[in-house]
Image: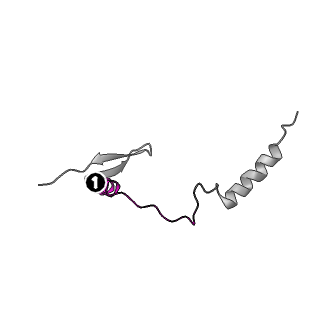
Amino acid sequence: MARIGRAHDRREAALLSVFGPAQVGDPLAPDREVADADRERDRALRTEFVRVVGPDGSSYLVERTVEG
């Protein structure tokens, strides 16, 4: 017995490979203001930690060592 909608699934997958997934937000909407707390948190993450990729491909943050 054939599955109904199976051919439709292949066509949909082919279209998604060209057009990609749907947009979540409105690309024409104005950018929202970024809070100072968010900017400070981002700066701290970029300066106090380093991203490490393990042998299994997973990534995680490790505190940067302070050389003094």
Relative to 32, 66 lies left or right: left
- The one nearer the camera, 41 or 55, is 41
In this rendering, the count of numbered labels is: 1
> Any magenta on residue 8?
no
Q: Secondary structure at mark 1?
A: helix
- The one nearer the camera, 29 or 6, is 29
Q: In the image, what residue occupies the spot 61% across and 57% down? A: 23
Q: Which residue carries the number 1 mark?
A: 44
Residue 47 coordinates in the image, percent (x, y): 27, 56
Image quadrant where one finds the N terminus: top right
Q: Quadrant of residue 20?
A: bottom right
Residue 5 coordinates in the image, percent (x, y): 82, 42
Q: Residues within 10 Å of mark 1 (few under 14, many from 20)?
A: few
Q: In the image, what residue occupies the spot 81% across and 48% down? A: 8
> Any magenta on residue 32?
yes
The answer to whether residue 55 is above or below residue 26 is above
Outermost residue, right direction? Answer: 1
Image quadrant where one finds the C terminus: bottom left
- The one nearer the camera, 28 or 5, is 28
Outermost residue, top direction? Answer: 1
Q: In the image, what residue occupies the spot 25% across and 52% down? A: 48
Circle 1: residue type: Ala
Relative to 60, 9 lies left or right: right
Residue 4 coordinates in the image, percent (x, y): 85, 39
Q: How is the image coloured?
A: one colour
Q: In the image, what residue occupies the spot 28% across and 51% down? A: 49
The answer to whether residue 54 is above or below residue 35 is above
Q: Quadrant of residue 25?
A: bottom right
Q: Quadrant of residue 35?
A: bottom left
Residue 39 coordinates in the image, percent (x, y): 33, 58
- Give the magenta-colored segment's residue range: 27-47
